[in-house]
Amino acid sequence: MDKRKFFRNLGVSGMALLASPTLMASTFSKRPQGLPLNAKNWIWMTPREGLKPEEWKRELDKIKDAGFDAVLFESYNGRKASFQTDRLPMGEPILNNLSAHGKEIGLEVHAWMFTMPCNIPEYVAKKTDWYAVNGLGQPANTHPAYVDYYKFLSPSHPDAMDFVQETVKSLADIEGLTGVHLDYIRLPDVILAEALQPKYDLVQDREMPEYDYCYHPLTREKFKNETGIDPLKDLDDPSASKEWRQFRYDLITDLVNERFMPEIKKQNKVATAAVFPNWEHVRQQWSKWQLDAFLPMLYHNFYNEDIEWVGRMIQEEKAALQQNAPIYAGLFVPELSPEEIKKAHKLSVEAGAKGISLFQHWSMKEGHWNAVKSL
């Protein structure tokens, strides 16, 4: 989901792009001695039209000065790219300059891409068979769940996944870039986080077919070849089938481990992903993914939880992981005070996380910057 648009639609304050923060020269901070090599703090960052190259550099300097180690820059949002490309609609190609400046100042720059959503008008209109299908037989390009831009591709369509894989490859090929960050590498939410449901006048106490994807003909055919069952025709209640559920988990896992991650590693880049704590509801069994690091979005307010929940989730997620990869707790800045950021960081690290990742850069107030500096 496009986080900026989604939370604006939800009415969450602070998600509209803020006025540009004060641009400042930096005095680069050094990591305290004794911290583990993979201990770091991250921040997501979105494009902003009209900034000059020197202004972008000063923003990176500010991020570095605050003590961040890595920035995740929105490089492809499912509609247009923010890097040089001849295969996607392109906005300002900011990423290429950012990666070079990040390398110069010792700040990791990772290309954050929306993986499964595709809102490019030409594809929406002409590649109609590429899109995921819900339990009512409706394709996501004409019947997206919740919001108009929830036009997810089907993980079973080979041409659609070739298209996504080529975007991953294009980003991994960029010189000076540290890594590629996979976002929305999943299916649409069959059940939204509890605090979000009232925004859509929903009570999702069960899996409803209009929000349940992917029933694409190719997905159903694959499942039938393996089991003899067509989940749309042969199951009275598809949501009760553990086998059908696991099959879709595995579709996404195979994309990560067999298609996308190898493209990133070919160029010796770092492979990461933004993932959900309620992974079952987005068919995202990320504990089986073979990535270098994970950034679970632990936005406790969305789940009607207190901030201590962040630490509890880190413990659960570390226990579930099938490899020894670092976890960085994703935190939602508009719903956190500076003191809460410090508390969430402490809870996360004590629970086994290697740091935090903040969403997002333009939402940071002076107090938030100071809080990160004090970590």
Image (cartoon, helix red, strand yellow):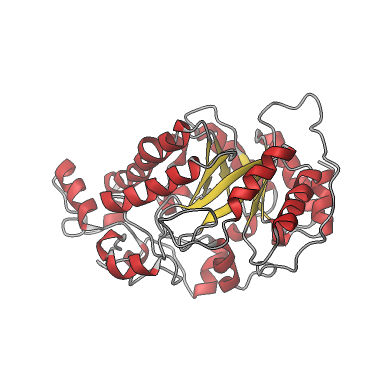
Farthest residue to the top: give it: 34
Taking the image as drawn, is residue 70 in sight?
no
Left or right: where 23 falls relative to 87: right
- Label tally: 0
Pick the front one: 31 or 94: 94
Percent coordinates x, y for residue 100 in the rendering? 65, 43
Q: Residue at x 75, y 27 (%)?
A: 35
- Please say if 248 is above or below 321: below
Query: Where residue 223 appears, x then y in whole percent?
Result: 21, 47
Occupied quadrant, residue 199 = bottom right
Give the camera-side residue of 225 and 263: 263
Observer-nearest of 168 and 309: 168
Tell me: residue 292, above or below residue 131.
above
| Residue 349 spot, x, y in % from top left | 70, 36
Q: In front here: 309 or 181?
A: 181
Q: Which residue ends up furthest to the bottom in the rendered image?
A: 201
User: Is any part of residue 170 visible from this angle?
Assistant: yes
Q: Is residue 277 left or right of residue 30?
A: left
Q: Residue at x 81, y 52 (%)?
A: 369
Q: Which residue shows up at 57% across the image and 71% down it? A: 10
Q: Position of residue 190 (x, y in %)?
A: 40, 60
Q: Is residue 6 left or right of residue 333?
A: left
Q: Is residue 182 above or below residue 124?
A: above
Q: Quadrant of the C terminus?
A: top right
Q: As drawn, is 163 to the left or to the right of 184? A: left
